[in-house]
Image (cartoon, rainbow, N blue to C red):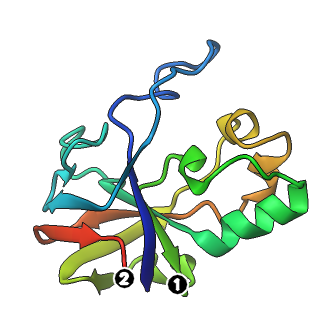
Amino acid sequence: MKIVSIYIGPEHNYVGHHGQPPGLSPTVRCAEVECVAGKGIKGDRYFGWKDDYKGQVTFFAEETWERLCQQMAVTDKDAGVFRRNVITRGVDLNTLIGKEFEVQGVRFLGTQEAAPCHWMNEAFGPGAEAALQGYGGLRAKILTDGILRVDA
């Protein structure tokens, strides 16, 4: 698995905004992030959010973003609009659901698909939620502390 980019979202834009406009907090692109076992990524909105939270970190495939850009003729959005943390290349993230895996010395447990929601239509474009069904990314728990870095 190659890490092509990493993002954190310091504030919630969608959680707690149902029936209202989303928040305006941007995602922040990072060269590296600190993963804390059982807590999440330092600086991210989900850090320490709930005990035993299934989405302490989220992964998203760059190949999915590329497919959506082509399918929907989108040229002005990067993968950060999906508000997933780690953008990967070269792995089918759905195969990691229910499995422990390691990236750059950090251990994770894939818990479930990061299911797309209606906000994807606003963040990326109309039809994005439907196009992402089965490809929304991977939610995971962090099992060991460590640093994740964008691969050179």
Percent across and percent down for residue 36 are: 13, 58
Q: Decide if residue 142 is on the left or right side of residue 31.
A: left
Q: Residue at x 78, y 61 (%)?
A: 68
Q: Which quarter of the figure is the C terminus placed in?
A: bottom left
> Farthest top residue?
20
Residue 10: quadrant of the picture = top left
Query: Does 111 sit left or right of 53 as displayed?
Result: right
Residue labelled with disc 1: 95
Looking at the picture, tell me which residue is in the foreground, 29 or 53.
Answer: 29
| Residue identified by numbered label 2 | 99
Near mark 1 (Cα within 10 A), the count class, few <14, some 14-19 or many ≥20, is: few
Q: Which residue type does callout 2 highlight? A: Lys
**For residue 148, above or below residue 76:** below
Apparent side of residue 58 relative to residue 60 in the rendered image (left or right): left
Label pair 2/1, CB-CB below 8 angstroms: yes
Question: Residue shown at 40%/52% (left/top)?
Answer: 7
Disc 1 secondary structure class: helix
The amino acid pointed to by label 1 is Thr
